[in-house]
Amino acid sequence: MSKKVAYWPGCVSRGFTPELHGSMAKVAPLLDLELIELDRACCSGAGVIAEHNQELADTLNARTFAMAQQEIRNGADLMMNICSTCQGAHSESQERLDASAEYRAQVNETLKPDGLEYTAGISNKNFLWLLVEEIGLEALKSKVKRPLTDLKVGPFYGCYIVRPKSRIGIDDEHPRDTYLPLVIEALGGTVIDYAGSHKCCGFPIITMNTEASLAQAGRHLGDAKDADADCLVTPCPLCHLNLDLQQPLAAKAVGRKLDMPVLHLPQLVGLALGLSPKEIGLQRHVVKPTSVIDWTTSVVGSVG
Amino acid sequence: MPSHDVLIIGAGLAGQRAALAAAETGVTVAIMSKVHPVRSHSVAAAGGINAAVSVDDDWRSHAYDTVKGSDFLGDQDAIEVMCSEAPKEVMHLEHIGVTFHRNETGHLDLRAFGGASVKRTAYVADITGQAILHVLYEQLMKHHETVDRYEEWFTTSLILDAEGTCTGCVARHIRTGRMEVFTAKNVILASGGAGQVWKPTTNALICTADGIAQAYRVGVPLMDMEMIQYHPTTLVENGFLITEGARGEGAHLLNKDGERFMEKYAPNKMELASRDVVSRAEQTEINEGRGVGLNGEGIYLDITVVPKKRTLEALREIVNIGKDFAGVDITREPILIRPGQHYIMGGVKTDIDGATPVKGLYAAGEVACVSVHGGNRLGANSLLDTLIFGRRSGEHAAERSKHMAMPVNDDAILKRDEAMISEIINRPKTGRRISEIKDELGTIMNQKLAVYRDEAGMLEAQEVVKRLKEESRSAYIDDRGTVFNQDVLGAIELGYMLDAAECCVLAALERKESRGAQFRTDYPERNDEEWQKHINTTITADDEPAITYSPVTITQWQPEERKY
Amino acid sequence: MEPKKPPQDFTLRVRRYDPESGEAPYWDEHTIQLEPHRSVLEGLLQAKGRFDGSIGVRCSCKAAICGSCGVRVNGQPGLACHTHLGDALKTAKNGVIDVEPMGNMPVIKDLIVDMDAVHWKKIQRVTPWLLADDENMPEREHIVPKEAMVDVTQTMACIQCGACVSDCLSMEVDPLFIGPAALAKSYRFVGDPRDTQQAERLKDIAEDPHGMYSCTHCFKCIEACPKGVAPMSQIMRLRRRATGDHHIKDRNNGFNHEKAFVKNINKNGLLHENDLLADSFGGKLNPASGLFLAKSLPVITRALLRGKATLKVALLHPHKAPADVKRIFDTIENRDKRNEFNLYISGTDEDNAPNQPEEAPQNGAHAGQEATA
């Protein structure tokens, strides 16, 4: 069943991790997913704008929601993002906006000059949730062309998409903090259970307590390595920055070799759905996804 | 061997207040507690603290309400002290940081409470005890250089010298098992009540009559021990407390016919009559078949009549308790409650400065009986009691310390207690388990020394307590270690509880009338002629309590018929 | 009211440690019988009472108010008395409920950890008492806004159980981090209008290299807290007050990072990482910025070589913020007073809606029951 989503790619997916945005664009048609990009929307604030001024963050996010709702009125099913941090920052704003008509009215007043208005109750899902809740694991499985047999994948969620449970909508019917292993398995891969899957990558304090930030990244990467993971997969580009881009520094911080490739979620899906490593931008990672490439060599050849 | 001018045992509100007051005078102070101070049971006091701070109020009105609430068994000199000093104490708390809720003008907000003729209860949502306790602990951290803290030290005995003056205590460091003699010019007992003698109870697991029994064992009389408060609103489910603040905010009590039955029992004050009156009314409804819930053993407390916003702001904690422990959203549906053991009005006999008949030994808070509560304590008077008499005993003990030399203790009691502990640890596993005895004690006390009592029932309880006391001497434990051996402490606590139970039953049998919390179906009337007096129980040579009497102090309010 | 379920068997697997034995920690299993809505603590107490009195666990009130029984149940920090057995079973592996001591603190015995060595030391670090104006103390109470006292009651509601400390992910790698409980305690004074040293308090914890800017936003403490204190939200409020109200320029780049981020979005609409990094260290020409960039240079060069970031993206700004974004910034940043909407104080519309049924009958009879006259 095809889906049409009002699509918020986030900033980092078009900045330091362009391969995320690119791979999502490549994977979408294979999943019968039509992406209506919200290209005028702005940064979710990643918690930092909220820290500076809550009303500002809520208003900027209400603006994004209002734009998505315009698309929903034009036929999109719901709003989708590909960034755990955006999801968390959005959910936090939405929690306040939906809680109070008075507060919402105040925020909408600021949006008014541009003809935008947010109506309570938007459905905004991360790609991970959409895979499980809208597309369905069975449907996903049926689309797999190249099962990730023998690929040992460690999940890494990103804090913003797993906590706090009530805000994120995690309950008995939606155990969203257990979705990554389900997706990895649906794609034919092997799930690696390790200590760091639901922990923090450390990115938010990279400029404020660099040592602790890198120690966090290094610790989780090391735990995954010790658990014999070939690679990690994450729905969060900010985690990707600390886990991949900063991995050489993280390795120094914890004093050990890490060499742990980190894939974006759409990349992992893309691989299983038959896309080539180059199409999904695996060559753009700082840590060469050697284990993944070894596995695909015989099928698609190595990447540049 | 640590020595201090003033040593306080127990670190709830009374203990911490005593420590701070004593330290302010410049003497050396130590405070000791078997739990970290913020775990003390004062933390559970929910509704608030009474004080005539409003311009429309007068402390005499507060005092009269308290005298009437006590069913004319309270000592009026002590009540006058407590009520007249209350406003100053509340302001002191505000000044050191308690976050009392405010009204629209930014002044202290006051809520209605049971047995009070006007709104005079200052509060912090429904975590007033917690807020005050934590603020006092903030002050202890601030004054860490003048108050030594012995946290997680368990007192095993008080020490008396040859003249019968208290000179310190023996305690066990729970973390290491090390036993130590603490020498002090003055000791203040502030170790709380005896709720665990009953099952269920609203009281925490730590409320095991420690101080009551320790004082009793060195010959201090226990007063009013028969006066046990059953709180009108405890969860049928598990005995947890639902604050009187709920009724203060306007909640109703309903029987199975949906009737606000308090109309029949207290037409003026309705749900806000004094606790003994409301609990009796509920128990009557239940006994006469108008209860609700499984077996009709409960009453509905309907909080849905309180505006939801107000409930969420002012009764937040019980919203959580309803949700987490009874599966009930109290903003949408009534919750099943019944009377449950909550407080002991009686305790270690003291004067208005907290001094017991034993020189050098003071007591304050629930462990003590001044007596300001007499036959029945008013809601939100307990926090006040702890603070006023905590402070007074702290000041008085400090003053006394200034005029004396540090006593010298030998290690006789220490050796005796070490032997006692080693005997418990090495018992063969042939007797009963401590937990079994504790359960049986709680159950019989809750059956026979509850809202309604009679001679036959209490005699039966007396027999059971006697037998359990015997069985406790051979009850075994599992833990043979020294680090955090909670098992051995449990065995010692059981002994404390049995002593308190024994005195409670004896005093209740003795009082052949109905007054305050003691209602005897075989003597249903109050009898001022014969029983307008305190009953004291004192230990005898054969380790059994004996009865004596002391007069009730009356200053300005003569006994009269009590109506709400 | 939903019908209560009858008692059933639950298996508790308790992490035991006996410091006197010289042995390593081990797991110990007990099967107890209780109703599913009873707590894990009640389960532990039954095991202790019936089978093994030597199980060490601190506990007192059983009602989530004394804060004694902080543990991890199936890896999640919280109060044993506040976790239903039935719920614990849902997250249990192989039908066995794991109970372990809290993390980030040394274990003394079984489920008992050394709170003094970590938690209380950190609390003591933040000057945890009110610093009122002692010279000018009012005779009666301080006159303060109603909302202000409700606001700090959120942090007063902390019962010092240590659940947030147990799983603080920053503390896991940086034991010196002041941590969620102590920082929430700090807000209790910073948010208290009676306190006279708010700027000093904020400067102190802003300048501490392990202070308020070492929180990584991981939400663990919000999730762990059984009392709704939301320590991380309090930390964010501390930061907001430090930068927005007191303009405290700290040496940890907290101030710069926030300003840089906000400026970045105002200018670009989207986050521009290179500018952000540089600005966070005081601008591209700041020596600190150069140092950080130099350290990061191999990484960035590598990123450029991998085609991850293009020179165009790195140096130019392909995105410009739409005009309405700038307008929103101007409107809100120029308000006289910063708006903060705290659900803890305000409640939701649903919370504030009139009670159901709208008008309670005079005698308080509730729906479905006949009222008697």
Image: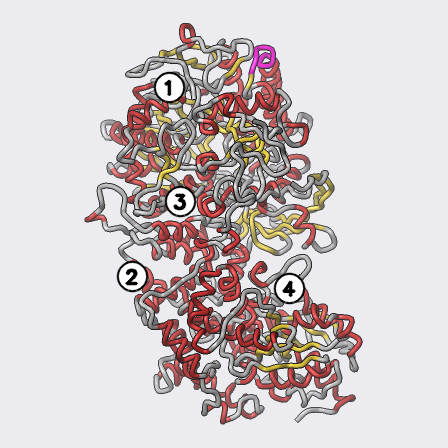
Q: Are marks 3 and 2 on the same chain?
A: no
Look at the image and tell me in which quarter the N terminus of chain A lies: bottom right
Secondary element under disc 2, as helix, strand or loop, is: helix
Q: Secondary structure at mark 3?
A: helix
Q: In the drawing, what numbered circle is on residue B134?
A: 3
Circle 2 crowding by C-alpha within 10 Å: few under 14, some 14–19, many from 20: some
* Chain at numbered mark 1: B
What residue appears at the point 32 percent right and 64 percent down from the top-left corner? C203
Which residue, given by chain and number where applicable, does mark 1 sit on? B74
Place of residue C334 in the rendered image (x, y in percent of width and height, measured from the top left): 33, 72
Q: Amino acid at mark 1?
A: Gly
Task: Provide the chain ID for the residue under circle 4.
Answer: A
Near-viewer residue (B269 or B512)? B269
Q: Amino acid at mark 4?
A: Asp
Q: Is residue C67 visible?
A: yes
**Residue placed under numbered mark 4 in the picture:** A177
Label 4 residue SS: helix
Of badges 2 and 1, the one in the foreground is 1
Residue most extreme to the left? C135
Vertical side of B410 occupied by C249: above or below: below
Q: x and y percent of residue C57 in the render?
A: 57, 43
Which secondary structure type mostly characterizes the magenta part of the structure?
A: helix
Q: CA distance from mark 3 to mark 1?
A: 30 Å
Using the numbered discs, state the Cα–Cα distance from disc 1 to disc 4 in whole angstroms: 59 Å
Magenta region: B453-459
Q: Which residue is mark 2?
A: C200
Give the spatial CA distance, label 4 vs label 2.
40 Å
Residue B483 seen in this snapshot: no
